[in-house]
Image (cartoon, rainbow, N blue to C red):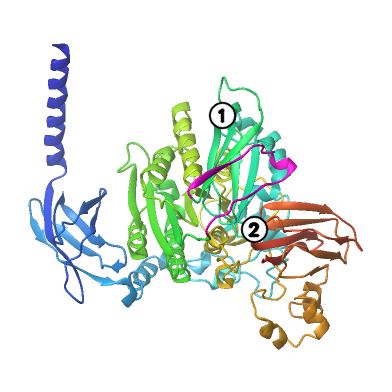
């Protein structure tokens, strides 16, 4: 009897809520058809997206190409989403109870260029808030590879107690750019500074380790490299780290064939101490077991699996953006950067299936908690969705980050196979500081790793040290990278300096494009790489393009002896091609594995890193030494020989080809 009474009360409450909601949000009606613009054929597998001043809604189109939807009165923006097609936005003011007919025509994406009209209008509308006065003038004659961005009082003004040198490596001074590309940023790959990360955990970040327990320490890391017998990286293989049958971590191999695995049971009560660890690798329709896996301090674990060579052509990129009021100082610049980023990667990746999506979020009690634009291979859809968003709400410091990450990881339709899956997480505040919220956040960080989603945080103005600690752990646990906005643009409120030694500064747009390329470049089945897909980082000093044919090399008019050295870096520098000092001499390049590195200057350390910047080998040295590292165990791809000099870090690009 009590149960029946409770049910009746609940039904009455639901009915009352629905009745009042209809009065608060008066309805309007839309119907019409969706057809191909040229042939007039009705299109199937289409969704209608409706954006009004309150929320975003999605509706299915029937098999006959027709739709009939109920939305809210007021201004409604309506457009269709279909892979391979572009549609224009239909904006209409709908009166209460009105019936509005909107027929939508879609044009094949292959027949038209992306919509630049809206972007141009958007830039004009926001030009007043993005004047050149907000951007400090940069010195055009500056050596962008090695010198500090600011000197003297300017440097002190913007550096604010830096512990090391800041250098700019963008190809353009910020003052010369348009509305996009104005935000400046740096990046930290903690995989590339692993000892420093351990020192930070014991120092500045130690106070947060008890509050946010889902963090990684030096001894927690295990790395497995999976390749075919021919040396091709095995991408997107599922790898499970186990201890006595207990699953510790599950992730997928990245575009280099490596996977980052973590020993996490110590974070949970009742778990036993470390015992013999194993790894299960599933790919090519079968599972193989590594019966012993050693920690990263003892090196990478290599595994060879024979199978067909097939590289996934899928690339999924999602943008998760904090849209609360505190983001108002930077959000329109972020939107312009995302707009240009979308156009650029769509152009660069015509030969792969690029899908884009987005989640904008605020907080409980705001106009909305989150809005989603689902994945689509039509970049126009995501672009329009992002440009329509605004910053508002919030009020307190923490925001609904946990809700946003859950939606992005769990409820977006990530590809089952892909060369890369990336979330750019843009925010200036953490989640709410309570145990249930932390548990939710940690759950979906782990799920992101399982799905092979790499989280790339972008810390905006207002970020504090705890948020930095949390975001850098997210990046490590998902094989990502930490980005942060800097004061060098003069845009927005002050930006906190990250805890690191040195970092380079360039535009956020360049950073995001570089990360996307680093995470998605793979060799084909002949172990060749597309040179156009690689965008150089870390004050890189290129030798000769290793993708050039031998005929192209001869066109440089090198001597026969020089040609035999296979693009020796020192020879190119002596020719004045790059105006650089000969610190080392590296050959052969490309290589099938063995390298010779002649140390010709006062250099104490040399590192081997992969395309993402992860350190693989380290050598102590002095002037006159000859190092002979061997890359044969690694999969084909791009690697770097990196070393510190008096003028800053240098990275020589090496191609491993077999």
**What is the CA distance from the residue labelled 1 to the residue labelled 2?**
29 Å
Describe residue 524's horizontal placement relative to residue 557 as left or right.
left
Is 72 above or below relative to 584? above
Q: Nearer the viewer, residue 10 or 599?
A: 599
Asked if residue 181 shows in the view, the reply is: yes
Which residue is found at the position 44% from the left and 28% from the top? Answer: 436
Is 169 above or below relative to 200? below
Q: Give the range drawn in magenta.
A: 285-308
Q: In which quarter of the image is the C terminus?
A: bottom right
Is 273 above or below relative to 468? above
- Residue 147, percent from left and from top: 72, 66
Q: Mark 1 points at which residue?
A: 245
- Residue 110, percent from left and from top: 34, 74
Q: What element carries label 1?
A: loop
Q: Which residue is at the far top?
A: 1
Q: Name the residue under label 2.
A: 635
């Amino acid at each position: 009897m009590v149960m029946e009474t409770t049910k009746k009360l609940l039904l009455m409450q639901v009915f009352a809520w629905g009745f009042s909601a209809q009065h608060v949000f008066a309805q309007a009606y839309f119907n019409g058809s969706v057809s191909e613009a040229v042939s007039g054929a009705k299109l199937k597998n289409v969704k209608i997206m409706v954006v009004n001043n309150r929320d975003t809604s999605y509706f299915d189109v029937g098999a006959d190409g027709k739709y009939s939807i109920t939305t809210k009165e007021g201004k409604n923006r309506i457009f269709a989403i279909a892979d391979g097609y572009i549609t224009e936005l239909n904006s209409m003011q709908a009166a209460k109870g009105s019936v509005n007919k909107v027929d939508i025509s879609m044009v094949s994406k292959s027949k038209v260029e992306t919509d630049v009209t809206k972007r141009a209008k958007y830039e004009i509308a926001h030009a007043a808030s993005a004047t050149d006065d907000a951007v400090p003038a940069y010195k055009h004659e500056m050596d962008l590879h090695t010198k500090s961005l600011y000197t003297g009082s300017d440097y002190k003004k913007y550096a604010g107690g830096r512990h090391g040198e800041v250098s700019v490596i963008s190809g353009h001074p910020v003052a010369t750019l348009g509305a996009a590309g104005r935000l400046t940023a740096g990046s930290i790959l903690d995989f590339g500074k692993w000892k420093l990360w351990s020192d930070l955990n014991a120092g500045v970040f130690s106070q947060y380790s008890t509050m946010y327990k889902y963090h990684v320490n030096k001894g927690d890391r295990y790395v497995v490299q999976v390749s075919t017998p021919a040396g091709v990286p095995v991408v997107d293989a599922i790898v499970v780290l186990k201890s006595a049958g207990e699953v510790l971590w599950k992730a997928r191999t990245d575009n280099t064939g490596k996977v980052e695995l973590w020993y996490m049971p110590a974070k949970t009560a009742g778990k036993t101490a470390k015992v013999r660890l194993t790894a299960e690798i599933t790919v090519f329709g079968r599972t193989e077991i590594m019966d012993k896996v050693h920690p990263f301090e003892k090196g990478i674990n290599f595994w060879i699996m024979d199978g067909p060579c097939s590289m996934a052509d899928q690339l999924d990129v999602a943008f998760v953006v904090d849209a609360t009021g505190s983001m108002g100082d930077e959000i329109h610049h972020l939107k312009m950067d995302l707009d240009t980023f979308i156009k650029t990667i769509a152009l660069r990746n015509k030969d792969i299936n690029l899908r884009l999506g987005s989640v904008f979020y605020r907080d409980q009690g705001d106009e909305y908690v989150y809005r989603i634009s689902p994945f689509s291979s039509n970049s126009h859809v995501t672009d329009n969705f992002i440009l329509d968003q605004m910053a508002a709400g919030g009020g307190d410091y923490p925001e609904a980050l946990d809700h946003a990450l859950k939606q992005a990881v769990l409820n977006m339709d990530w590809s089952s196979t892909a060369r890369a899956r990336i979330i750019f997480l843009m925010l200036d505040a953490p989640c709410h500081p309570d145990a249930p919220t932390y548990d939710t956040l940690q759950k979906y960080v782990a799920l992101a790793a399982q799905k092979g989603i790499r989280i790339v945080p972008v810390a905006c103005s207002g970020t504090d040290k705890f948020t930095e600690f949390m975001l850098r752990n997210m990046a490590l646990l998902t094989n990502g990278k930490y980005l942060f906005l800097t004061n060098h643009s003069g845009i927005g409120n002050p930006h906190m300096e990250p805890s690191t030694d040195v970092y380079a500064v360039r535009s956020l747009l360049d950073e995001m494009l570089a990360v996307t390329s680093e995470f998605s470049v793979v060799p084909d089945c002949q172990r060749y790489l597309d040179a156009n897909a690689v965008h150089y980082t870390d004050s890189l000093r290129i030798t000769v393009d290793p993708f050039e044919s031998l005929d192209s090399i001869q066109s440089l008019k090198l001597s026969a002896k020089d040609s035999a050295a296979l693009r020796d870096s020192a020879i190119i520098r002596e020719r004045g091609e790059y105006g650089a000092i000969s610190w080392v001499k590296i050959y052969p390049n490309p290589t099938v594995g063995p390298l010779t590195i002649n140390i010709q200057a006062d250099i104490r350390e040399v590192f081997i890193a992969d395309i993402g910047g992860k350190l693989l080998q380290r050598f102590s040295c002095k002037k006159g030494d000859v190092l002979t590292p061997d890359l044969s165990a690694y999969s084909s791809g791009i690697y770097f020989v990196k070393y510190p000099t008096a003028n800053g870090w240098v990275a020589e690009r090496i191609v491993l080809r077999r």
